[in-house]
Amino acid sequence: MDIETPFLRVLLTLPARRVLGILDGLEPHDVHRPQHRVILTAVARCARKQVDDGDDHHPVSFPVAVQLDLSRTGDLDHPHVRELLLDLAAGINPVPECWVVDIVADLRRLRLRRACVAAGEALVQAGRHGGDSDLTGALRHLPALLAVAIRAGLTVEEDQ
């Protein structure tokens, strides 16, 4: 299930200051799809500008401000970004605002799952066919994997 699109939709209904507070808990790669990441970054820039301009109690001006931001960065030229922008503008928000914190946690857990798959595939490949340098390279995934797990809310204890 795609939780990134409903997440963006609910963000666009929230006051700019609240958007920034929610996004403060996310890293760019917590959002998987590049076009979602691009629009999320644009929403964050627009929210920051509104807060800086003293208009922090209103939602981000969508689609006008976001579209102008994406146009300035050249990201609006990408067909997947344009398609998502249209989808967001036409869609009805199916997610209640109170779920936004849970969605942030879900995005982190999904990122952890993707990181686990990538690390696992690298370890399996190195274990089957690799030399020492391949094994060493695959093992380099593990510290980052632990950091992502902790951000996702897992309690990770290292064995002594």
Image (tube, grey):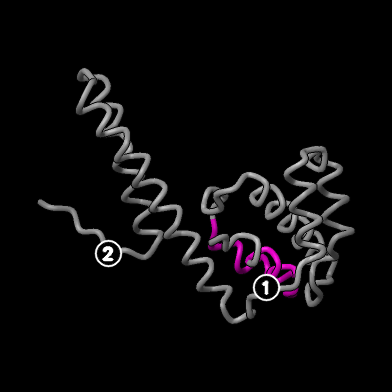
Question: Where is residue 153 drawn, in percent x and y?
Answer: 37, 65
Amino acid beneath label 1: Arg
Q: Are marks 2 and 1 in contact (CB under 8 Å)?
A: no
Label 1: how many residues lie within 10 Å, few (<14), some (14-19) or many (20+)? some
Give the percent coordinates (x, y) of residue 57: 79, 77
Residue 146 lies, with reference to residue 108, above or below; the image says above
Q: Residue at x 31, y 50 (%)?
A: 146
Spatial distance from mark 2 to mark 1, Cα to Cα? Answer: 28 Å
Residue at 68%, 55% (x, y): give it. 40
**Residue 140 has which mark?**
none
Residue that appears at 69% across and 47% down: 38
Position in image of residue 117 (x %, y %): 35, 44
Which structural element holds mark 2?
loop
* Residue 139 figure quarter: top left
From the viewer's perspective, tell me whether residue 71 is left or right of residue 113.
right
Q: How many marks?
A: 2
In this picture, is 159 found above or below 74?
below
Q: Which residue is mark 2?
A: 155
The residue at the point 40 percent across, 61 percent down is 152
Stretch of the chain drawn in magenta: 7-26
Q: Which is nearer the eye, 127 or 1?
A: 1
Residue 83: percent from the left, percent from the top?
77, 49
Crowding at mark 2 (Cα within 10 Å: few <14, some 14-19, many 20+)? few
Amino acid type of disc 2?
Answer: Thr
Q: Is residue 58 left or right of residue 44?
A: right
Quadrant of res 122: top left
Residue 9 located within the stretch drawn in magenta: yes
Secondary structure type for disc 1: helix
Residue 18 disc label: 1
